[in-house]
Amino acid sequence: MMRHRFLANLLVPTLCVGTLLPTLGVAGSDHQNSDPSRLAVIKPAPDFTLTTQDGSKLCSSDLKGNVLLVSFIFTTCNGTCPATTHRMSQIQEELKKRNLFQDGRVRFLSISLDPVRDTPEVLRGYMKLYDADPSHWTFLTGPPDQVAGVVKSWGMWAKPVPNGQLDHPSRIFLVDALGRIREIYNLNFLKPKWVVEDVELLLKEASSEKH
């Protein structure tokens, strides 16, 4: 099945409390095609140092050699964030079924867009709502200025709107073992089967590069 995608600069901002537009997406790919080039290199993933749900520091350099699925959410969101995290939970379960977490080469990251409210304690509670396994899924926060810099470096943003919500794009990033962004999903394209196939492809690429 062909996934019709567009260039990253055509990504349309999505209001957290609004309706997700179906035209978002990047990097066309055909899942009938096993050619690794179907996941083109988009750009290097930005570096970061943030605080985990356990209060420890995590640097992007600590994740070298891992395939990453990176989302940007906030815990009081009543729009796309719960749906995104739920979908990632489904992807987590599918990866577990295929034993793709077994060697520690796949990691999930969820970075808060609201670090003032999303303390490590709050993030730990949020993780439990979605059965997020901390052995491979980390939620991240930090000082507001630091988080804002990370959010901007990934091409994301968040603007306050009435009733405590945030206007922000819906984007989930797939990063290969060399630290390069290879896909940017929106919620419409964040289908467990497709994402697992993409993760498997990047794991195969990483294995072949070692030999």
Image (cartoon, rainbow, N blue to C red):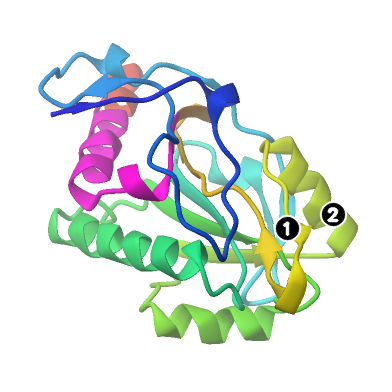
141 versus 176 height, above or below: below
Residue type of the residue flagged with mark 1: Leu
In primary-sequence order, the first of circles 2 and 1 is 1
Asked if residue 92 lies left or right of residue 143, the reply is: left
Q: Is residue 77 visible?
A: yes
Instruction: Confirm or deny contact between disc 2 and disc 1 (CB under 8 A).
Output: yes
Q: Could you tell me which residue is drawn at 82 percent across and 46 percent down?
A: 149
Write the start and end of the magenta stretch as one range: 183-204
The residue at which mark 2 appears reads as 146
Give coordinates of residue 197: x percent, y percent: 20, 38
Give coordinates of residue 125: x percent, y percent: 54, 87
51 versus 123 height, above or below: above
Give coordinates of residue 175: x percent, y percent: 47, 35
- Nearer the viewer's eye, disc 2 or disc 1? 2
Q: Does residue 194 belong to the magenta stretch?
A: yes
Specify the quadrant that holds the N terminus. Answer: top left
Q: Which mark is residue 50?
A: 1
The part of the image, by quadrant, that contains residue 185 is: top left
Residue type of the residue flagged with mark 2: Gln
Give coordinates of residue 115: x percent, y percent: 76, 69
Q: Is residue 135 visible?
A: no
Asked if residue 20 lies left or right of residue 1, the reply is: right
Q: Could you tell me which residue is drawn at 34 percent across and 18 percent down?
A: 209
Q: Main secondary structure of the magenta part?
A: helix
Residue found at the very far right of the displayed protein: 145
Helix, strand or loop status at disc 2: helix
